[in-house]
Amino acid sequence: MNQEMTNELKERILFEAQGLKLPCKQAFAIASEVGCPISEVGKACNETGIKIVSCQLGCF
């Protein structure tokens, strides 16, 4: 993933996050809309201090 796409992803995550939390369902939607793997969304969340909540897989 190039730097421009990574920056776009982080901006989108920060916009969608509510109080430094992002629902898992929304993380999957962002990955689909941006066209990146869900793992990249998780990595970007970690880098921006956003916590994924309400995990659909029971991981968080």
Image (cartoon, rainbow, N blue to C red):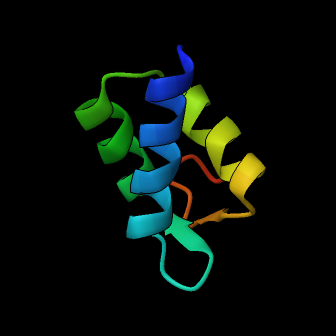
Of all residues, the one furthest to the left in this rendering is: 33
Which residue is at a point 34% across and 44% down the rendered structure image?
Answer: 30
Evaluate whether residue 59 shows in this view. Answer: no
Q: How many numbered marks have been drawn onto this rendered protein structure?
A: 0
Evaluate whether residue 31 shows in this view. Answer: yes
Rendered-image quadrant of the C terminus: bottom right
14, above or below 38, in the image: below
9, above or below 22, in the image: above
Residue 35 image point, x, y percent: 31, 23
* Residue 20 figure quarter: bottom right
Of all residues, the one furthest to the top in this rendering is: 1
Which residue is at a point 58% across and 29% down the rendered structure image?
Answer: 40
Residue 1 image point, x, y percent: 53, 14
Of all residues, the one furthest to the front in this rendering is: 4
Residue 45 image point, x, y percent: 65, 51
54, above or below 36, in the image: below
Taking 45 as reference, is 37 left or right? left
Which residue is at a point 37% across and 57% down the rendered structure image?
Answer: 26
* Residue 50 figure quarter: bottom right
Closer to us: 2 or 56: 2
Taking 44 as reference, is 26 left or right? left
Which residue is at a point 44% across and 49% down the rendered structure image?
Answer: 27
Residue 56 image point, x, y percent: 49, 52
Taking 34 as reference, is 8 left or right? right
Taking 1 as reference, is 48 left or right? right
Closer to us: 4 or 47: 4
48, above or below 57, in the image: below
